[in-house]
Amino acid sequence: MIRDLFAKIYKNKGPLGKWASQAEGYFIFPKLEGSISNRMKFHGNEVITWSINDYLGLANHPEVRKVDAEAAYEYGSAYPMGARMMSGHTSFHEQLENELAEFVSKESSYLLNFGYQGIMSTIDALVGKNDVIVYDVDAHACIIDGVRLHLGKRFTYRHNDLESLKKNLERATKVANQTGGGILVISEGVFGMRGEQGRLKEIAALKNEYKFRFLVDDAHGFGTLGKSGAGTGEEQGVQDDIDVYFATFAKSMASTGAFIAANKEIIDYLKYNLRSQVFAKSLQMQLVIGALKRLDMIRTMPELKEKLWVIVEALQAGLRARGFDLGQTQSCVTPVYLKGSIPEAMALVKDLRENHGVFCSIVVYPVIPKGLILLRLIPTSMHTLIDVELTLKAFSAIKERLENGVYQHLSTLVKAEISE
Ligand SMILES: Cc1ncc(COP(=O)(O)O)c(C=O)c1O
């Protein structure tokens, strides 16, 4: 019997969608209003905002805003029209690619309209059906979707676990020996939920034992790690061992777009084979010119990164001193793990937002194990030490209430109130 395609959708809204009626507009799809900054408005009240990846505070920097506005005035939002290959190529795109390549110490780079589709196409273009992919099980959705396009074998290794990686490299080597293919290993530079750095140095060292190429998604490392801000490869001294480096403009660059960087021959190949670029309109000029400005500021204003790290260290040290579990973070991403149910997590976050003016993201099962609540804080160079102090006070207060069972009691009320 054939069913209506939509029948399953009416029944099951999906793992996140099922919370929509209770959570939408507050916990999911919240509206943060006002200029992007350390203080924004939520439901009409000022909140200290810890949920925006504007690490270096470039989103609203007056010089950046000026360049963005002038570029928009000069070129509008259409130019250039068409795909890069056909009619959407400009000297500015080329200049940005040259500067990005130089900044991350690679021969060449290529722009991507979005990180998500861009890395999917990168994975798709790098592997053929005889090749094998080995990737960290905690990889970002865009990596997983890229792997889904692959017609050959793929293996996951346990998160940041070198023994598990080795075991899977053995399996991959066996397969590749039979098919005559190669192996692509994929890790993130910084894992965006938990803040751990990928073990890039140790993974790269495995090239002495196994034959593979290494792709790193450094969305959160670019601009925040490494002496010059060139990312996690620079931080761990292994940039040369990363065969294909990827970063998005959506975080430190505070914009839209992304890039990949590698040897010239590889980029020349990818330029012609990245389906999400070949068959899509070129990155618009306003974003390209804006990215040139942002990159220039990252290169010439180290104080932005220094200020960011003052805030990161104050926040993370303060939370640890108050007994919070921050897991293994080795980056700006500041996860706070608490024990509790999803309704308790909702009551707790509501208390934080309404009574303490602190806005951070909340992550629950199925993204993390059942019974855990993850509050994720993203420090930026816009934050002040006063923001940190107020936030630490708020966290001490919610910890006590969580431990005393207050949120368990409140959780029954939260559902009702939110749906009002
Ligand atoms: C690790 C990681 N990779 C890729 C992306 C996707 O980048 P974009 O937002 O440019 O599509 C993100 C999110 O922005 C990310 O966190």
Image (spheres, rainbow, N blue to C red):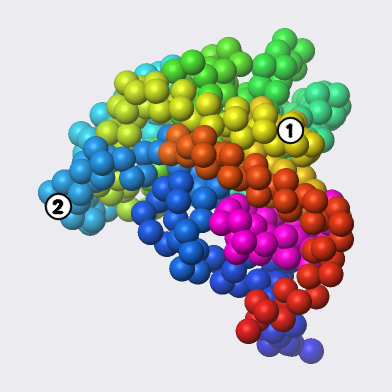
Q: Which mark is residue 249?
A: none
| Residue 389 at x, y percent in the picture | 59, 39
**Residue ID at (53%, 26%):** 310
Q: Which mark is residue 320?
A: 1
Residue 387's place in the image compared with 2, above or below, is above
Q: Is residue 226 left or right of residue 187?
A: left
**Residue ID at (16%, 46%):** 70
Evaluate whether residue 131 shows in this view: no
Pick the residue in front: 347 or 406.
406
Residue 150's place in the image compared with 350, above or below, is above
Q: Is residue 389 magenta-colored?
A: no
Q: Is residue 164 left or right of residue 306?
A: right
**Quadrant of residue 328 in the image?**
top right
Distance from mark 1 CB to nearest ligand 1 atom below 8 Å? no
Residue 144's place in the image compared with 342, above or below, is above
Q: Is residue 352 magenta-colored?
A: yes
| Residue 236 at x, y percent in the picture | 61, 16
Query: To which residue does mark 2 refer?
Result: 73
Q: Is residue 212 left or right of residue 295?
A: right
Distance from mark 2 CB to nearest ligand 1 atom below 8 Å? no
**Residue ID at (59%, 68%):** 26
Q: Nearer the viewer, mark 2 or mark 1?
A: 1
Start-end of magenta stretch: 339-366
Q: CA distance from mark 2 to mark 1?
A: 48 Å
**Residue ID at (51%, 50%):** 49
**Quadrant of residue 137 in the image?**
top right
CB-based contact (under 8 Å), mark 2 and mark 1 = no
**Quadrant of residue 356 in the image?**
bottom right
| Number of numbered markers | 2
* Label whose residue precedes the other's in the sequence (2 or 1): 2
Residue 90's place in the image compared with 78, above or below, is above
Residue type at numbered disc 2: Tyr
